[in-house]
Structure formats: structure tokens, C-alpha cells
Image: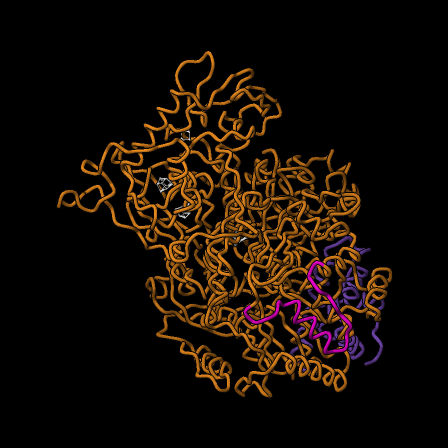
Chain colours: A purple, B orange
């Protein structure tokens, strides 16, 4: 896995979290999860989970909070 | 088939609802109050002779040919300038009128050359027609006296004679044939709004003159052609008509350049296109056009067009021409191999915003039904995807709310991040007309675009914000509206969710959103923001028009939501004159989005996870459709670099040139094993392709385009495809090669399938479009005539949704190494990546991309106007020439991206919109320094491009 594309994925997830962080609090985590479920291809979600499972370094707390609501794709 | 002759009613229609009845030549006629007698007569089928009148502009009353007599009134009033009145009894033909008219015509003809037989306008000349109509039989005056016709009079030089002006590449001006009717001057003013022409001198000395007695090319003229169309004689004539002759049949079709979607009559002689004439019944353009649509079609015959399919093993090999069947078989075998080897999701496709709805629909169908995944995306990704997302969230539908006619009812127009005079010229002309009638204008743009100050137009407010601070400015505008009590609470209570509104209002009312607070980073003085907010909220019908300056930011989607908030808080939704209007870039951006080009959506914006929608298509197509979203273009490239994405079919797009961070795109393409490019030319992306399938132009196929106002316009075939097949046929053959049982005989059958599966298109068919001219979706049982204006009685999603829009500074920041902000845009004569317009005479207006820089920044760096400079960002560097101008603020530089050698996207980074990955073209931190020529990258790139364009057995094309 390219280091570069992984960093980009973390960046994208955090960007999404930044938007939802400003939304009413009770909607924020669900907002992040719904967005990622709707727009991220399984490969991208799989990579995200690999990263979360190995500590989730660099990910915004809101992404981590949303993780339980993000659909886990089947293993490749 | 025959030539379509449109009726010219002589003067514009009146909008009055009061009707007036009068008698003309004994026939009773009822027309709206304010109608001219000339128009009323035409309504009754009586054509009054005329020369200076045309229904494209206001009456002028100078030729005195249209005289009539009115019972009980003395004299002979001009019918074009005399309005109807109840009970008038008008005669259009009496002995006295006949005499006067003949006298008038005799004078005209006595100063007009009599070379009708060899004149280019022969057969299409109103002067000829009128001479015939009034029965002119002889002319008593010769050319011995004063005239404009002959270069020499009795051996002496005739000072009144002027030579032809052939400076414009597309039309000529021959003063000897001018009758000084001033139709051209008025067309330029009233229709186009450029004011390039004047009538100089008086009486017999008066002449039409471009600019300050310049030639057309050196004047302000933008070559829209309105004057050429208006000219009743051969004075202003298309060069193509001079060269070919008069057309014999015409077909109505749609421009393939921008999202205005102008309707044209393609006037033909056999299969040769003689000229394009804007169609008056075209509901987007109402008989007007710009230089691209009217004149820049020469690319379809350009020698660079590739007409045979080609393949090659490696991208370093020369191309090898093959038969179509070999090409299809090769692609099918390769894609099947890749899927077998790397998995079903390792291939995908890109649909084109330049192709028809039907073609786009087929490409996404090929991906979903043939490849068995949802890896389909479109280049709308890089321009308007935030519009879809933002408006979808706020209103429930991913499209603009108005038709273009709506602008005629606007009182305050707000233009955000768009440059309509260059990007959407015909809309700009219509807007300018409304502004000259007194509507107010607010411009929010880092650059002082042309519309801020142009002849007879001055924006009330120009907010020259720092690139990247859109959300801050728009939230500040909302702050002023809410805190100053200007919100339209009645509208909000009725149409929006009140508790969401309260939450939002409290949010924007926070002091840190006040213009005084945001001024520090937006750079816009607070009083300008307050003034603009008050004007928009209280100035009557407020309409927002926005472009790529809004969407191509890391907060693009948030900005679109902020725009929707502004429209809702002021109640500017759901009637003529208001609304939220994205100005779409390419001709079919709207359509390609509608047709399910996005990896998460089936046609009609229905999410791929929706079982009922998938079922509709699964039944019809006989396949399983994956319920997981596919990859977007940037994700495809990332996956390619990761090694999990290996093959792509790209129809009519040039992602290497149009997408950001060229080096990353190149790396992604280079990592794939089968790149199939389907296009007119060996574009930049084709440098990385293994298969090239020749494409066809919009003149060579049937189909539909959907413009920025959701208008579905017919595209009609006027000539046989030079490459043999329309693009939809190629996609179909490819699908067949992959084992799909597709048998469309005509694009109309594809549209029938779209209508059957997509509720917002339910009533659309080619027959219905032929009958209606065009319709705006939704067009179904509830809206049988289509929907010119949306959200009339309520929002599509139910209640309008206010969404908090927090400004977040982009991570693309200036610093000591990159102290300037680069923003990008386009100009009138060129189109997007320029592949088409660069292959026409339009290059006379824009031979190269230039960097606009403020005098202060230039001086600091020792840069003079026209110097070569090096432009560098974190992503890369390129070189181009400068244009020093104060249109850009200090600290901001600007360039276009129409030419591949400039490689502006080597500079742009891969930051993108948080919601849609729409790239952040509009903000890049850069440094500018003197240079003496092309950068290494440019040279390497040129060399690589040259190598990769070789075709075995053919001499390298001379560049
Ligand atoms: S081509 Fe258009 S801009 Fe130029 S003079 Fe004619 S009307 Fe004016
Ligand atoms: S150029 Fe044509 S339109 Fe203009 S004044 Fe002369 S005849 Fe009339
Ligand atoms: S480019 Fe746009 S404005 Fe110009 S003619 Fe075509 S559709 Fe109309
Ligand atoms: S047409 Fe009425 S005066 Fe010319």
C-alpha cells in the first residue's frame, strides 16, 4: 500500500470530520459515518479500517467516534 | 428538408396582458398593448416592407420604408415605431404609400453596387427583397455623383469609399454595401451588450465603425456575430458563406461548447456546413450566440482528427492502426483479463460532459452491467460535483432552480466566482440587458471581472475577496441579514424547517461571523459586505449565479450550502427572477450528472444503495448491480498507484490536462495496463493510452444535451461521422464484444429506456421534444410541460434545510516560499482544455495562456509586461508569459488553462472539496520569478507527447 495514498485517505476523512464537527453535536458522528458509507468505495473504507485497527494515528477523534457506524466492507 | 425561415415580426413582443383590437387592411387583429403596428400586421399575416427593423431589437424608425396610413390621422407614420391603439384602421398599401416606398428604395439602390449576381448575399438579401416588394423598376440616379460604391470617381480617389475589412477570421465588413440601417449597431448594443459599433458622421457621410474607427479585430468586438445576423445586406457576411454559397437546408441542433446550451440552425449545403445561425425559438439563447458556438466548428474537419482505431502494447510504442473489430475484441479481452487477474473492481469508465445524454447513459450502463461494478465517474467531478451535493442537501435536488428567462425578472443579481462574459457569454448578454434596464449587480470574485465595469454597467458592489474565503464572506452576508432583521421569516416558517433555521440563525449571528471580524482574512472591507447583504435582502427579486470559483475549493460543497442558505433566508426561491443558479462549464455537465455518471448514483440521482432503484435497472438489464459506491476519478488514480485499479475506458475527456496535479494523474495512468481513450484527437491523456477509439462530433450524431437550466435540447445529426460511427455506436459495439446483448438502433431508443427508468424523465421522448422544442426536467405526470422553475410550492425534499457553514481555511496557504495565491479561469474564445477551440481560428484571440499579475507584485520581482516567468508551487512548476494588470489584487495571480504546453495543472495541488473530492483549482500558493524559457518538465513533457503520438507507417505530423 502506498504511503502517499494512505496519508491522503486520512486527510480526506479528517476533512469530512471538520465539516461535521461544526454541525449540531448529536448529528456529527452519524454525519461522518453516513457520508463515508454513501461515497467511499469499499477499498477506501477497508483501508480506513486497517488504519483505525492499527491505532488510527492522525485521524480526527470524530472519525474514530464515527467508526462504529461506518460499514465494514467484507475482506478483499 | 428545407431551409428554416424564421418569421421576423419587426419589433419585439410586448409583455402586456391588456389586449387591443384594431383593423389592418380590413382584417381585425387583437394584440397585447404596446405592440407595434408592424408586428400586429405580421401577426395577421401582412408583411409591411421594412429595412431597419428586426424583432431582435427595439424599433428605430430610420429607413422610412414601413410607412402606413391610419384613418383619421394625417401623414404616414412608420409602422415599426407606432404602437397599436383600439379601433385604429390601418392601410399598409395605398397609391401614396407605394410611391413613397419606391422613392425610398430608389435612393438606397442608387448608392448600392449592382453586383447582385455575384454577391455573397444573393438569395438572402433584404435589400433585394424590398426592391422586389415595392416594385422598383428603374433607378434614375447614377453613380456619377457622391457615392460610397466606387473606389474612384472619374479617375479621382473617392474619399467616401472604404475598403473591405477582413480582419475578423469569420466575417467581413464591406462598407460599399452598407445602407446605414444601424441594425448592426443596435444588435451589438441591445442583443450582445458590447457596444463595439457606432455610426460615425452624419447624413450621407454616416458610416458604421468598429471602435474608434478601427478594424474589427482591433476593436472591442468579441465576434459574437449578432451584427452579422442582423445585417440585411452583404455588408457583414460570414466568410464561410462567401466561400461556399447560400445554404439549401437547415437542421436545428444544440451547441456543444458551454452549459448555456444555445440552439442553432445548422445551415447546410449537402453535407457541408455553411454556417450556424442561432435559433430564435431556442429557449436558452433566444436567437443569440457567442463566437464559439456560431463560428468555432472548424475543428470537426481538422487534420489532427483521428479516424481509425489504433492500439499498442506499451505506451512507448508507436500506434498501430487496426480495424474496429480488432479494437473491440482487444479491449474486451484486456478488460476481461484484468478483471480475472486483479478482481472485478479493477476496471472502470469515465463519461463525458461533452457527449450526449444517451452516450453518457450507455457508458455508465457498460460499467454497471458489463464491468459489474460502479467505478464510473465524470469530469463534472472536477467542476460542479459540489453543486450536486450542496443543493441536494439543502433543497433535495441537484440542479439550478431557474430558467434563463428568469433573469428578465431579476432586480438584484449576485455573481459569485463566475465570469459570465467569458464563460457563459449568451447568459451574460441577457443579464447585461437586464442590468441596463436598472437591475443591480453584486460581484463576489477575487478578480475584477469584465462585468464589474463594462459599457453602461457598473456593479453596485464588488467584493474582491482573497481566494479561498468564500464561505467566510457568504456566512458574513448571512450574519448581516439575520442580525439586522432582514430575514424573510414568513417564507422560512412556511417553507423551511424552523428549528433548523433557528439553529443556523444563532450560528451565523455569532460575532466572529460579522463582516468586521472576517475582514481580517477575506480582505473585503466590512461596509461593502454590509451594503451588499442589505441590497440582496431588500432589493426585490434576488438571484444568485455562481460558477467554478465557488465549487473548485476545499470547501466547495459548504459554499454551495451557504448560497442555498442565503436564498432561503431572503425568500428568494420558487418564482421567476430569483433562485440559485449554477453556471455549468461544459455543454452537458448537467446531463452527465443526471444520467448516473457518479459512482454512487443511478440515473436521476438515486443512491446506489436504494434497493428499489437497483431493482428497476436489474430487471431491465438482467444483471446484479453492486450496492456499494464505486471509485471517483481521484480515487481511481490513487487505487491505480496502489496497484488495484488497472483498466479504464475514457469517453471524450482529457483528464491528464483537465485534472489537477498532472504528475499524479500521469503516475496513475502509467500504472494502468489498459487505458482506452475515445476522443476526436490524440489528446494529452492519450499519451498514456493503449487503445484509441476515434470519436465523432456533435454534428455527426443524434442525441440530447441538458443545459444549466435542466433543459433537454435535441442534438441532430447533420453529416455522416467522419470516423464512421457515433460515440454511442462505439460504446454499444464494445458492450457487444464484452458479451452484452445491446441492440439500440437509434439514440431515441436509449432515451426511451431513460424515460422508463427515471421518474424525472418519464415523459421525455424524441417525439415529445420535437413537439415541444425542448423541456426542462422534471418532466412527468406532475409536470407534463417540464419545470422552468423548481420548488414553486415547496422544496423537493419537503422543508428547505438550513445548514451551518463554518469557514475552514484551506491547507493550501501562502508562506515565504510561495507567497502568492494562484487562481484559474477561462476566457471567451477558448473552451476548457481547448482541444476544439485551439483547432479553429479562435486562436487569433488567445494564442497562449498568460499569467495576470498586479503591477506591485511584478515590480517587486523585476518582471515586465510580456516577460517569461517561472510559476512554481509545491506540486511543480511551469513557465508562461505575464500580463501586468490591476484586475487582480496584490498577492493574487491568475491564469487560464486552455493550452497544453502551459501545463497549469502541473502547478495545482491535489487538495479537494471535503464532500466530493472536486479539486481545489481556485487556490494554489505559488511563487513567480523571471525565467527565460520553458521548464524542464515542459520540455520532457513535449518530448514524451511527441513520442507517444507516433503512428506506425505515417510521417510524424509537423507541429
Ligand atoms: S460581432 Fe458581436 S461584438 Fe462584434 S461588433 Fe458584431 S455584435 Fe458587436
Ligand atoms: S452594416 Fe449592415 S446592419 Fe450595419 S448599418 Fe450597414 S447595412 Fe445596416
Ligand atoms: S458556447 Fe455557450 S454561449 Fe456560446 S454559443 Fe455555445 S452554448 Fe451558446
Ligand atoms: S422599418 Fe420602420 S422605419 Fe425602417
Asked if residue B782 shows in the view, the reply is: yes
Residue lying at 46% horizontally and 11% vertically, measured from the top left: B72
Q: Nearer the viewer, residue B133 or B197?
A: B133
**Segment colored magenta:** B722-748
Question: What residue sits 60% from the left and 33% below the top?
Answer: B540
Q: Please give left or right for residue B618 compared with residue B258 in the image.
A: right
Looking at the image, which is closer to me, A42 or B373?
A: B373
Given residues B510 and B490, the one toward you in this image is B490
Q: Is residue B457 above or below residue B592?
A: above
Percent of width and height locating residue B278: 51, 48
Specify the quadrant of the image occupied by residue B574: top right
B738 in magenta: yes
- Is B957 situated above or below B131? below
Residue that sits furthest to the front in the current view: B137
Residue B446 visible in the snapshot = no
Q: Is residue B694 above or below residue B620?
A: below
Quadrant (top left, top right, bottom left, bottom right) of the C terminus of chain B: bottom left
Q: Position of residue B641 (x, y in %)?
A: 65, 81
Q: Is residue B574 left or right of residue B932?
A: right
In percent of width and height, residue B177 lies at 31, 43
* Quadrant observed for ligand 2 in the rendered image: top left
Amino acid at each position: 500500500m502506498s504511503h502517499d495514498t494512505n496519508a491522503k485517505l486520512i486527510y480526506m476523512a479528517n476533512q469530512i470530520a471538520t465539516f461535521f464537527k461544526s454541525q449540531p453535536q448529536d448529528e456529527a458522528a452519524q454525519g461522518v459515518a453516513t457520508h463515508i458509507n454513501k461515497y467511499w468505495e469499499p477499498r477506501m473504507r477497508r483501508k480506513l479500517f486497517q488504519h483505525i485497527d492499527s491505532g488510527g494515528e492522525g485521524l480526527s477523534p470524530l472519525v474514530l467516534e464515527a467508526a462504529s457506524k461506518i460499514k465494514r466492507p467484507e475482506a478483499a | 428538408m428545407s431551409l428554416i425561415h424564421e418569421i421576423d415580426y419587426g419589433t419585439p413582443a410586448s409583455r402586456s396582458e391588456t389586449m387591443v383590437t384594431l383593423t389592418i387592411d380590413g382584417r381585425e387583429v387583437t394584440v397585447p398593448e404596446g405592440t407595434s403596428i408592424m408586428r400586429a400586421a405580421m401577426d395577421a399575416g401582412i408583411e409591411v416592407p421594412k429595412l431597419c427593423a428586426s424583432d431582435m431589437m427595439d424599433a428605430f424608425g430610420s429607413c422610412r420604408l414601413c410607412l402606413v396610413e391610419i384613418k383619421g390621422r394625417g401623414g404616414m407614420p412608420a409602422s415599426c415605431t407606432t404602437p397599436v391603439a383600439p379601433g385604429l384602421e390601418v392601410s399598409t398599401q395605398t397609391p401614396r404609400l407605394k410611391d413613397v416606398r419606391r422613392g425610398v428604395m430608389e435612393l438606397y439602390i442608387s448608392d448600392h453596387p449592382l453586383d447582385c449576381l455575384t454577391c455573397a448575399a444573393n438569395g438572402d438579401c433584404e435589400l433585394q427583397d424590398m426592391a422586389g416588394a415595392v416594385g422598383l423598376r428603374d433607378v434614375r440616379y447614377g453613380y456619377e455623383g457622391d457615392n460610397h460604391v466606387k473606389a474612384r470617381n472619374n479617375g479621382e480617389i473617392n474619399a467616401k469609399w472604404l475598403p473591405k475589412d477582413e480582419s475578423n477570421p469569420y466575417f467581413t465588413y464591406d462598407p460599399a454595401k452598407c445602407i446605414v440601417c444601424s441594425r448592426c449597431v443596435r444588435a451589438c448594443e441591445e442583443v450582445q451588450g458590447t457596444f463595439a459599433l457606432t455610426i460615425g458622421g452624419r447624413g450621407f457621410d454616416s458610416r458604421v465603425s468598429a471602435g474608434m474607427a478601427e478594424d474589427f479585430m482591433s476593436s472591442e468586438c468579441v465576434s459574437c456575430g449578432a451584427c452579422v445576423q442582423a445585417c440585411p445586406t452583404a455588408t457583414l457576411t460570414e466568410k464561410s458563406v462567401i466561400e461556399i454559397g447560400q445554404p439549401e437546408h437547415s437542421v436545428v441542433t444544440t451547441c456543444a461548447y458551454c452549459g448555456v446550451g444555445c440552439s442553432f440552425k445548422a445551415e447546410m449545403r449537402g453535407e457541408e456546413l455553411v454556417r450556424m445561425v442561432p435559433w430564435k425559438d431556442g429557449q436558452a439563447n433566444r436567437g443569440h450566440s457567442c463566437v464559439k458556438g456560431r463560428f468555432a466548428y472548424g475543428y470537426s474537419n481538422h487534420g489532427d482528427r483521428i479516424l481509425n482505431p489504433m492500439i499498442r502494447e506499451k505506451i512507448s510504442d508507436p500506434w498501430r492502426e487496426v480495424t474496429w473489430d480488432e479494437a473491440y475484441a482487444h479491449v474486451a479481452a484486456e478488460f476481461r483479463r484484468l478483471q480475472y487477474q486483479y478482481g472485478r473492481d479493477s476496471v472502470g469508465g469515465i463519461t463525458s460532459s461533452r457527449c450526449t445524454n444517451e452516450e453518457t447513459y450507455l457508458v455508465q450502463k457498460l460499467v454497471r452491467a458489463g464491468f459489474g461494478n460502479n467505478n464510473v465517474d465524470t469530469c463534472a467531478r472536477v467542476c460542479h460535483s459540489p453543486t450536486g451535493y450542496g443543493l441536494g442537501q439543502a433543497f433535495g435536488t441537484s440542479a439550478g432552480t431557474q430558467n434563463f428567462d428568469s433573469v428578465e425578472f431579476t432586480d438584484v443579481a449576485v455573481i459569485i466566482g463566475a465570469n459570465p462574459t467569458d464563460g457563459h457569454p449568451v447568459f451574460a448578454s441577457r443579464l447585461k440587458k437586464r442590468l441596463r434596464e436598472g437591475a443591480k449587480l453584486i460581484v463576489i470574485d477575487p478578480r475584477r471581472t469584465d462585468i464589474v465595469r463594462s459599457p453602461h454597467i457598473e456593479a453596485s458592489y464588488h467584493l474582491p475577496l482573497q481566494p479561498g474565503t468564500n464561505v467566510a464572506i457568504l456566512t458574513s452576508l448571512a450574519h448581516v441579514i439575520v442580525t439586522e432583521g432582514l430575514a424573510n421569516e414568513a417564507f422560512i416558517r412556511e417553507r423551511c424547517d424552523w428549528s433548523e433555521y433557528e439553529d443556523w440563525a444563532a450560528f451565523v449571528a455569532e460575532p466572529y461571523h460579522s463582516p468586521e471580524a472576517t475582514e481580517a482574512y477575506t480582505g473585503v472591507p466590512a461596509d461593502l459586505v454590509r451594503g451588499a447583504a442589505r441590497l440582496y435582502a431588500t432589493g426585490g427579486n434576488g438571484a444568485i449565479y455562481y460558477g467554478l470559483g465557488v465549487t473548485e475549493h476545499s470547501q466547495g460543497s459548504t459554499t454551495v450550502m451557504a448560497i442555498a442558505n442565503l436564498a432561503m433566508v431572503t425568500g428568494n426561491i420558487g418564482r421567476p427572477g430569483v433562485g440559485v443558479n449554477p453556471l455549468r462549464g461544459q455543454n452537458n455537465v448537467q446531463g452527465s450528472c443526471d444520467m448516473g455518471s457518479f459512482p454512487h448514483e443511478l440515473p436521476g440521482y438515486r443512491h446506489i444503495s436504494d434497493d428499489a432503484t437497483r431493482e428497476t435497472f436489474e430487471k431491465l438489464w438482467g444483471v446484479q448491480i453492486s450496492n456499494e459506491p464505486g471509485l471517483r476519478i481521484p480515487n481511481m488514480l490513487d487505487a491505480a498507484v496502489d496497484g488495484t485499479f488497472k483498466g479504464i475506458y475514457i469517453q471524450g475527456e482529457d483528464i491528464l490536462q483537465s485534472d489537477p496535479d498532472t504528475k499524479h494523474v500521469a503516475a496513475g495512468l502509467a500504472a494502468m495496463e489498459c487505458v482506452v481513450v475515445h476522443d476526436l484527437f490524440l489528446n494529452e491523456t492519450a499519451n498514456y493510452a493503449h487503445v484509441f477509439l476515434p470519436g465523432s462530433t456533435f454534428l455527426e450524431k443524434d442525441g440530447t444535451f441538458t443545459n444549466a437550466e435542466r433543459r433537454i435540447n435535441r442534438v441532430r445529426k447533420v453529416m455522416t461521422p467522419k470516423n464512421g460511427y457515433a460515440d454511442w455506436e462505439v460504446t454499444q459495439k464494445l458492450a457487444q464484444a464484452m458479451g452484452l446483448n445491446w441492440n439500440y438502433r437509434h439514440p431515441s431508443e436509449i432515451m426511451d429506456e431513460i424515460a422508463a427508468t427515471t421518474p424525472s424523465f418519464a415523459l421525455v421522448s424524441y417525439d415529445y421534444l420535437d413537439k415541444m422544442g425542448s423541456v426542462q426536467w422534471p418532466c412527468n405526470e406532475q409536470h407534463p410541460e417540464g419545470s422552468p422553475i423548481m420548488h414553486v410550492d415547496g422544496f423537493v425534499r419537503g422543508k428547505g434545510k438550513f445548514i451551518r457553514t463554518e469557514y475552514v481555511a484551506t491547507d493550501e496557504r501562502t508562506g515565504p516560499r510561495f507567497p502568492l495565491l494562484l487562481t484559474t479561469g477561462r476566457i471567451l474564445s477558448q473552451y476548457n482544455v481547448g482541444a476544439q477551440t485551439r483547432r479553429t481560428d479562435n486562436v487569433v484571440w488567445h494564442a497562449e495562456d498568460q499569467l495576470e499579475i498586479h503591477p506591485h507584485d511584478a515590480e517587486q520581482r523585476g518582471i515586465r509586461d510580456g516577460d517569461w516567468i517561472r510559476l512554481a508551487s509545491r506540486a511543480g512548476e511551469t513557465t508562461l508569459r505575464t500580463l501586468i494588470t490591476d484586475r487582480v489584487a496584490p498577492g493574487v495571480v491568475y491564469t487560464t488553462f486552455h493550452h497544453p504546453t502551459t501545463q497549469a495543472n502541473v502547478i495545482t495541488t491535489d487538495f479537494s472539496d471535503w464532500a466530493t473530492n472536486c479539486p481545489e483549482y481556485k487556490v494554489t500558493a505559488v511563487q513567480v520569478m523571471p525565467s527565460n524559457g520553458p521548464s524542464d518538465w515542459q520540455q520532457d513533457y513535449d518530448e514524451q507527447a511527441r513520442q507517444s503520438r507516433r503512428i506506425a507507417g505515417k510521417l510524424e505530423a509537423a507541429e
